[in-house]
Image: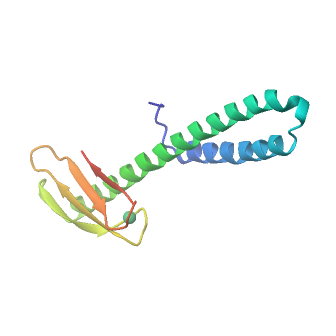
């Protein structure tokens, strides 16, 4: 499990790293020549693997960031409404901004589970 650093700066850094290295990947692709092909193929495989790992990590971070942002919005909403600890309801989804986030918070431990009405948007169970 990669260390979680959910700052906006780190996300931007990863996005920039993918962009730069995608260009590098394209450059290597067009410069392939016969005598260097085997060596560069291995280099390409490594680069592709590295890019895949980076993309996966970015995807994971985005999911976690979405859950944290949604959870904070739910808690802020419940606090503002002075809801009891055990409660349920809906708020506009802060992630896709078009769907509705259905949530439920357990009275006994405060755990929240929630799901957005938009397909493939945020959802989680604590
Ligand atoms: Zn949503």
Please report the residue visible at 80 percent of the width from the left and 27 percent of the height from the top.
39
108 sits to left or right of 101: left
Position of residue 50 relative to residue 80, above or below, is: above
Report the residue that reaches farthest toward the front.
34
Please report the residue visible at 41 percent of the width from the left and 46 percent of the height from the top.
64
Q: Is residue 63 visible?
A: yes
Which quarter of the figure is the N terminus placed in? Answer: top left
Position of residue 121 relative to residue 48, above or below, is: below
Please report the residue visible at 17 percent of the width from the left and 47 percent of the height from the top.
110
In percent of width and height, residue 108 lies at 9, 45
120 sits to left or right of 102: right
Please report the residue visible at 57 percent of the width from the left and 44 percent of the height from the top.
55
In percent of width and height, residue 37 lies at 83, 32
Report the residue that reaches farthest toward the bottom.
98
Q: Looking at this view, is 19 or 92 the one in front?
A: 19
Q: Looking at the rendering, which quadrant does residue 102 occupy?
A: bottom left
22 sits to left or right of 94: right
Which quarter of the figure is the C terminus placed in? Answer: top left
Q: Looking at this view, is 104 or 84 the one in front?
A: 104
In percent of width and height, residue 4 lies at 46, 36
Color theme of the render: rainbow
Report the residue that reaches farthest toward the top.
39
Q: Looking at the rendering, which quadrant does residue 91 occupy?
A: bottom left
Q: Is residue 82 visible?
A: no
Image quarter where ligand 1 lies? bottom left
Q: Looking at this view, is 31 or 82 the one in front?
A: 31
In percent of width and height, residue 111 lies at 20, 46
């Amino acid at each position: 499990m990669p260390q979680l650093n959910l700052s906006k700066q780190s996300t931007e850094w990863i996005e920039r790293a993918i962009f730069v290295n995608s260009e590098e990947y394209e450059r290597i692709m067009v410069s392939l020549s016969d005598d260097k092909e085997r060596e560069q193929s291995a280099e390409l495989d490594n680069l592709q693997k590295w890019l895949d790992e980076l993309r996966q990590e970015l995807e994971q971070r985005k999911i976690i960031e979405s859950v944290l942002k949604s959870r904070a919005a739910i808690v802020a909403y419940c606090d503002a409404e002075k809801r009891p600890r055990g409660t349920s309801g809906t708020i506009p989804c802060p992630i896709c901004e078009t769907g509705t986030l259905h949530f439920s918070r357990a009275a006994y431990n405060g755990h929240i589970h929630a799901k957005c009405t938009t397909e493939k948007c945020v959802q989680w169970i604590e």
